[in-house]
Amino acid sequence: MILNSTLRILRKSGLTRTTAIFLRINKNRGNNIMTTEKVFKGKSELMVVLEQLEREKGILREDVFKTITDALVSALRKYFGKTAQITATIDPETAEMKGFLVKKVVKQVFTDELEITLEEARKKNPKAKLDDDLSMEVGIQDFSRIAAQTAKQVLVQKIREIEKVKVYEEFKPREGEIVTGLVHHLAGRDIFVDMGKTEAILPYGEQIRREHYTMNQRVRAIIHRVDKENKGLQIVLSRASTAFMKGLFEAEIPEIAEKVVEIVDIVRDPGFRAKVLVKSNSTKVDPVGACVGIRGSRIRVIMSELSNEKIDLIPYIEDTMALLAKAFAPATVSSVRVLDKESKKAMVIVPDDQLAIAIGREGQNIRLVSRLTGWQLEVKSEGQKLEEVRKNTEASTQDLLQIEGIGPKAADTLVKVGMNDIRKLSALSVADLTSFEGIGEKTAQKIISGAQKFIKEHPDYGNPQAKAASAAVDEDASEAEQKPPEGDLEKKEVQNEPEENKK
């Protein structure tokens, strides 16, 4: 029974091409005992199965032998008792299995499972002596159906454990390697891929959204991670990771494989657009040209593998502002201005016809640039920027015209040279102002005097908190104007009462 179960289990482990097992199972109706008679043709049939298991699954026969003997011991314990001392052997050539019950030779037996009297021991072995450990062979046919089932369950578990360890040891070091398999089956949105010796999963989150898969379709992906969980081993594949794209570049571009060209960073919107930052370790090699290839031959192969995902190749530049401008490709950038260096905020100006390209579909391009560079970016067209400057200039001019002694011409001159802050003007000297073209000494004196007078009359000028407080007061005042006095409300209510109530 144990041999029959073993062979059947080994077959279910993936050995579908194994020849039929020559076994005859006879039932002894009187004792309800199962007996197994093996029929061999040259080599043991079990050995044929084990050799195939070793070839196809990489599981050593020694490991399987140990599994079988452990299962045999477990089944015998089920039959003879949990505390019984049991040993088992298997002949590696003939696959003949033997089980042994070990008992201590004593004068008086207190525990049947562990002890035997000297008289009984000598019936088994005439040379037996007190305190000897007597090994008594028990036929493997002495299994009940329940014992055989126990052996089968142990064997199934052990075989799975061996296979799990072997697969883990093979695939764990291969994390980050690009592999090819065939779609075996679909489970919801997840795809299970046949890897030959085992199965891997391509989860929905690691797929390229635009792709659809069919049975037996070839799939190329990277081994993202190998998880050893309680439920079993899981080999997770990925096509959406940046590591997969990097692996494709290394496979298709010799300069990258040889470290002549280096990939600094990659950001992706899988299946749609990616930005790859590259730099050359040789002055003789153009990093972008090496990746593109003759007439785009190299980059087209990579894009094709990724469902025609657009790839922007960005040459690495030490100058951050220049790098930001390059990263907006395919859009052209007019200028980049830092708004806040500490928090990494910048303003990017582009030609009017490049604004949509710079932002990208649903903000895709600007989002990728931000991820690639680590900067928070605001994009405006040249037209938008000019309009903004015009409005700011008008506002500044109006502010300056509030100062006594400043006319439109002087206000325009001050705005052009960037001196549109009244508080700063009040602190300047005549020499400071006359250094600007178009402002004479008398005009400078008038401007400074008028600015100082304005600040004295408006001490909160330029203070944001004061402005906010002033705005709040104005709002309250406005509400107060709109709300009639309480007395008036009462009068109106009385006036509106029905005539019947008044009477």
Image (cartoon, rainbow, N blue to C red):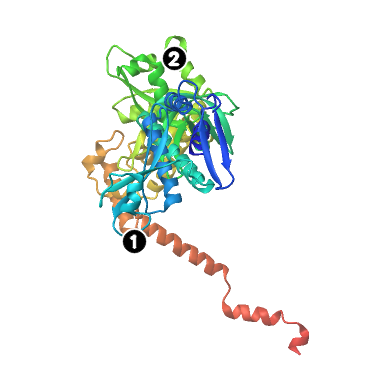
> Residue 85 vs residue 195: left or right?
left
Residue 497 image offset from top left, x and y in percent? 72, 82
Q: Residue at x 30, y 50 (%)?
A: 423
> Residue 419 vs residue 396: left or right?
left
375 vs 465: above or below: above
Name the residue type under label 2. Answer: Arg
351 vs 411: above or below: above
SS under mark 2: helix
Residue 335 image offset from top left, x and y in percent? 38, 29
- Residue depth check, mark 1 versus mark 2: number of the one nearer the observer: 1
Report which quarter residue 114 is drawn in. bottom left
Q: Nearer the viewer, residue 278 or 169?
A: 169
Give the spatial CA distance, label 1 vs label 2: 82 Å
Q: Residues within 10 Å of mark 1 (few under 14, many from 20)?
A: few
Q: Residue at x 40, y 38 (%)?
A: 98
Report which quarter residue 112 is drawn in. bottom left
Residue 371 image offset from top left, x and y in percent? 40, 35
Q: Residue at x 58, y 28 (%)?
A: 213
Query: Which label's residue is closer to the chain start, 1 or 2?
Result: 1
Cβ–Cβ below 8 Å for labels 1 and 2?
no
Give the labeled residue for mark 2. 298
Name the residue type under label 1. Answer: Phe
Give the labeled residue for mark 1. 110
Residue 36 image offset from top left, x and y in percent? 51, 36
224 vs 406: above or below: above
SS under mark 1: loop
Number of the label disc, if any, that sits on residue 61: none
Q: Residue at x 35, y 51 (%)?
A: 120
